[in-house]
Image (cartoon, grey):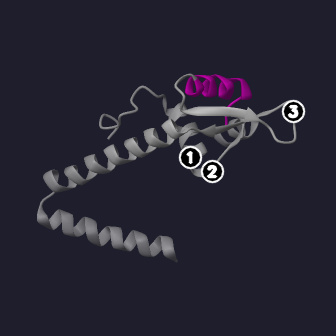
Amino acid sequence: MRAASSQGALTPSQRAVISRLYTEGPTTTAALARAELVRPQSMRMILATLEEQTLVERTPHPTDGRQVVFSITERGHEAIASVRQAKQSWLLDAIDTRLDADERRTLAEATDLLKRLVQE
């Protein structure tokens, strides 16, 4: 699945940060560091790389002039969507080509059971 991803150049930490910004919205370096369980210095390096690639951007914090807020850019949104599409395509192809009809039926049944567990 990783090979199918168009973002192979990003490290797992970089992918985690951009995904967090995608799902949770803009936040500070410190908040990202806490969420990802890394030191603020490490998070600054991750964000600097993502900013160089124009996947994230910084803006001044609205109430604290000492901080900045990072958010995902349009290019970052497109990159996340592209990665998700590539992974989904890979998985659908793998199911279709590597599993026989009985295995696909078993997978569908298991998926239904998992959905029911999550909803309860």
Q: Nearer the viewer, mark 3 or mark 2?
A: 3
**Disc 3 secondary structure class:** loop
Residue under the image location 18 percent in, 63 percent down: 103
Residue beneath disc 1: 22
The disc, 1 or 3, on the residue closer to the chain's N-terminal end is 1
Q: Amino acid at mark 2?
A: Glu
The disc, 3 or 2, on the residue closer to the chain's N-terminal end is 2
Residue under the image location 63 percent in, 32 percent down: 57
**Disc 1 secondary structure class:** helix
Q: Nearer the viewer, mark 1 or mark 3?
A: 3
Q: Position of residue 82 (x, y in %)?
A: 38, 42
- Magenta stretch: helix, strand or loop mostly: helix
| Magenta residue check for 40 | yes
Residue beneath disc 2: 24
* Whether residue 89 is situated above or below residue 119 in the rendered picture: above
**Disc 2 secondary structure class:** helix
Look at the image and give the residue range highlighted in magenta. Answer: 37-51
Left or right of residue 2, residue 50 in this image:
right
Q: Position of residue 96 (x, y in %)?
A: 17, 56
Front in this rendered view, residue 15 or 71:
71
Q: Amino acid at mark 3?
A: Gly
Q: CA distance from mark 1 to mark 3?
A: 24 Å
